[in-house]
Amino acid sequence: MTVTYTSKVASCKGFGCFWKLLLRWKGSIYKLVWPELLFYTFLYYTCSATYRFVLDEKQRRTFEKVSIYCESFIDLIPVSFVLGFYVSIVVQRWWDQYMSLPWPDSLALFVSTSIHGQDERSRLMRRTVMRYVNLTELITLIMISPTVKKRFPTLDHLVEAGFMTSNEKKIFDDLDAKTSHPKYWMPLVWAGSIVSRARKEGRIRDDFAVKTIIDEINRFRGLCGGLLSYDWISIPLVYTQVVTLAVYTFFLGTIMGRQFLDPAQNIAKHTLDFYVPIFTLLQFFFYMGWLKVAESLVNPFGEDDDDFEVNWLVDRNLQVSYLIVDEMHSEHPELIQDMYWDEIFPQELPYTVAAEQFRREPPQGSTAHIEVPEPDQEFLPLLEEMDDEEDLQEERVGDVKVDMKNGTQAIDIMKKTGSIGSSISRMSSQTIASRKPSMLSMLMQKVKSGSHENMRRRSSKPLGSTTSMRHMRKQRGLMRSASRMSSSSQVCQSPESVARNPTILTQVRWDYIKRSFSY
């Protein structure tokens, strides 16, 4: 019963594609509105004829006052707001009900794939599981759809149609005697028991397949329960009543308020006298059509033109279920190489002459047209490298100053010690970032502690002594090598890579041993 017109509006050309749909009758707004529109027109012209030909002058003046009064207050009824909000709720509910329709295709695929065997018992298990699934859906639709109820009014009709056996009908009758609650779920319980038995008999080879089938059965039951919930819980009746009363009260008021009055009375907004209220009739057509749309979609399982084809759905689901689990079970075409086997994938698929106009280039990113000049593609130097070069220059200047005067050697050593400390601090931060202690960081800590200890010892000796000068030279060479190693490790290598380099470790250890034995 669903009216489909998608093929008619596939392309919009000219003045639009909806014009070709206006003359269709089935499922149209004309089919829904024409009784109310005809009755409204009859009432309107009855009042108009009474005003023009039946009433005397005094009664006409009274009629005109009533008409002006109705015209002033009918706009206080919020028809557009109330009706628009109500229709939006109904349309959303209508689509949600369609999405809740249970389809057994996925479950049939799982059953056909998981329950193995070509013998009669395996085939019987697969077909019985799918028969129970379709029986559950049919019982659910019988409870909510008048068209399906008229087709299968009793359980005997289900037995005669092949959905149920006499033994299963007896079980349902016994349950009906015990409780009046819906028992649409009972066939799914039987289907789950069959799946468990197939696992025990080895026809299902693993527990994961059993879980997959049971989960799909539970999902199917949830969809059937959702359809029953939509049938049980409707849009609140008070809202439906408010919408209906608002629309009908509004147009009852327009029967008097939209009358054409005598222009000789010089009444405001009544300077013209027409016999056909064109815009009033259009307003009735649109508002009443809006209400009729809500009335036809509030229950899509009825007998309206746009209601769901539930009887077709029952036939289709049973046929497809048996086709998947029985006719096509363990069957597939012969495995052969496809025509693109040697080239892995097709470079381009062919187009027909009719489809050539739809050939398009593959979509690209929005920055595909931006080209960066080659000179601008070079990376800028990092700030840490520039800082390391400045530290090396300061160390060289400090070395020259140390050789100039003996009196300033201690001061330069203090500066050099601070420079080494800053280098070691930067290297320590990088070592902490790697979260693993290395041999180089331990050596740096020892060099730093040794330099402070030597400065403390030298402070008690005269600067001009030969021993002090020898210690200073050795300390300066050790600091210079440690500084170079620190800067090179920051710029070129990580602390871990330096620790793994045997040449660098050997040099550091030898400098440390010479410094230790010099005392």
Image: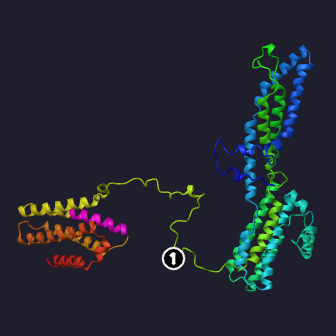
Judging from the image, what secondary structure is the residue with disc 1 in?
Answer: loop
Q: Residue at x 12, y 69 (%)?
A: 472
Residue 50 is situated, as x and y percent measured from the top left of the image, at 91, 22
Residue placed most toward the observer, 409 or 77:
77
Residue placed most toward the observer, 228 or 106:
106
Is 457 left, or right, of 99 in this rendering? Answer: left
Q: Quadrant of residue 261?
A: top right
Quarter of the C terminus within the rendering: bottom left
Q: Quadrant of residue 427?
A: bottom left
Which residue sits furthest front?
Answer: 353
Q: Is residue 499 magenta?
A: no
Instruction: Indicate whether 190 appears above or below 422.
Output: below
Residue 141 is situated, as x and y percent measured from the top left of the image, at 83, 61
Q: Is residue 424 magenta?
A: yes
Is 389 left, or right, of 272 in this rendering? Answer: left
Residue 418 appears anywhere in the view = no
Q: Residue at x 9, y 70 (%)?
A: 468
Q: Residues within 10 Å of mark 1 (few under 14, many from 20)?
A: few
Q: Which residues are magenta?
A: 418-434
Instruction: Indicate whether 304 appears above or below 332.
Output: above
Q: Which residue is under mark 1?
A: 342
Q: Quadrant of residue 257?
A: top right
Main SS of the magenta part reads: helix
Residue placed most toward the observer, 126 or 238:
126
Residue 376 is situated, as x and y percent measured from the top left of the image, at 31, 55
Instruction: Indicate whether 488 appears above or below 69.
Output: below
| Kind of residue sitting beneath label 1 | Asp
Q: Residue at x 51, y 74 (%)?
A: 344
